[in-house]
Amino acid sequence: MKSLGMAVLMAGAAMWLLAAPLSAQTMGQGQVVVTVLPKVEGQPLPSSVTQQDLAVKVDGKNAKVTRWAPFQAPDNRIEVVLLIDGAARESLGRQMNDIAEFVNNLPPNVKAAIAYMENGQAVFTAPLSSDHAQVLKNLHLPGGFADPSPYFCLSELAKHWPGQDPAARREVVMVTDGVDGYERQYDPEDPYVQTAVNDATRARLVVYAIYWMNQGRADQTMYANNAGQNLLAQVTQATGGKSFWQGMGNPISFQPYFEELTRRLRNQYELGFNAPLNGKPEVEEMKLKLHAPGTEIDAPEKVLMVPAGEN
């Protein structure tokens, strides 16, 4: 019996030794953009939001925070794509000045571009550029083409991001009603939305949305518009952005939304962490809690985890 017990003990020890290197190899790393703002608008942020104030979970497991820092020069590079629904038609005309003012007032560290949703793609008017006046030369009203799904366009944009700077933050502002022409009822498991979320997460996009009811859709209903708003919120929350909307009607002006968006771009942090991984890059569920009085946080609900040591 003693010999049997010793054999079992030795076998267990051998299995532990074999498992130890495997465990080390299955650690993954994630990196996301997080926005931290005061809970009360106009109030300053706490002077010190530290790494110790954070609690991160990935796929329900505790993660170890490895980096927490505000974006500052020279690493404060941003690429912003304004993605406009092709079905907006003439109804968007009164917002053109607000769009132009937003792009024109972006700081020099921001490269911008304008694209239109057409045939399931993001059709660019010009490349990303820090010459904002040049970007605005090709700003125009949409052609009135009702794309079947804005989420196809977001997926294509994520897969073919026009920027070449892997260190730049990637931000998207969708102007659309969010209605999925293939799935007009609200379905939280809408496959096209889920695909767009995964593609955007893999491309490390932060997605914002400005709800605009597209007058070009002849079969639009209040029910469909409500579904569109919910789908947009699903995408923006998953990627750490925000949806801007005003009931079921169109806002008088985009200016307040752009002002808040500008404030958010100025208050973003880089968050890095390690967590267990199944051995290959995966999009995982993520939860972040910030224990800092007087603050609110917008963090992605999804994260691309890659094997530790990979970028």
Image: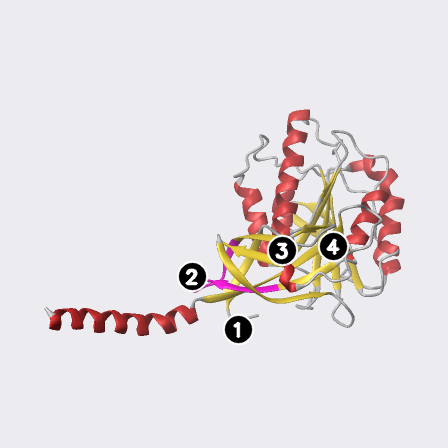
Look at label 3 and name its amino acid: Ala
| Place of residue 184 in the rendered image (x, y in percent of width and height, measured from the top left) | 59, 31
Query: CA gap, disc 4 to disc 3?
Result: 11 Å
- Select label 3 or label 1 by which is in front: 1
124 up-or-down from 69: above or below: above
Q: Please tell me in which quadrant of the rendered image residue 235 appears.
A: top right
Q: Residue 278 carries which label?
A: 2
Front-most of residues 281 and 142 = 281
Position of 243 compared to 277: left or right? right
Residue extent of the magenta highlight: 272-284
Are the residues at dot 4 and dot 2 in contact (C-beta closer than 8 Å)?
no
Mark closest to the chain's N terminus, 1 or 4: 4
| Residue type, mark 1 in image | Gly
Marks 1/4 in contact by CB < 8 Å: the verdict is no
In this picture, is 207 found above or below 24? above
- Of the residues under marks 1 and 2, which one precedes in the sequence? 2
User: Residue 249: x and y, percent?
Assistant: 77, 29
Residue neighbourhood size for the residue with mark 3, other residues' Cα within 10 Å, grouped as few (<14), some (14–19), many (≥20):
many
What residue type is disc 4 on? Answer: Val
Instruction: Return the residue at label 1.
Output: 309
Q: Where is residue 170 in the image (x, y as percent from the top left)?
A: 69, 59
Q: Any mark on residue 158, and which?
A: 3
Q: Which mark is residue 209?
A: none
Q: Any mark on residue 81, and which? A: 4
Q: Distance between the residues labelled 4 and 2?
A: 33 Å
Kindly identify the residue that appears in the image at 71 percent across and 60 percent down: 49
Q: In which quarter of the image is the N terminus?
A: bottom left
Residue in the image at 70% along x and 36% along y = 177
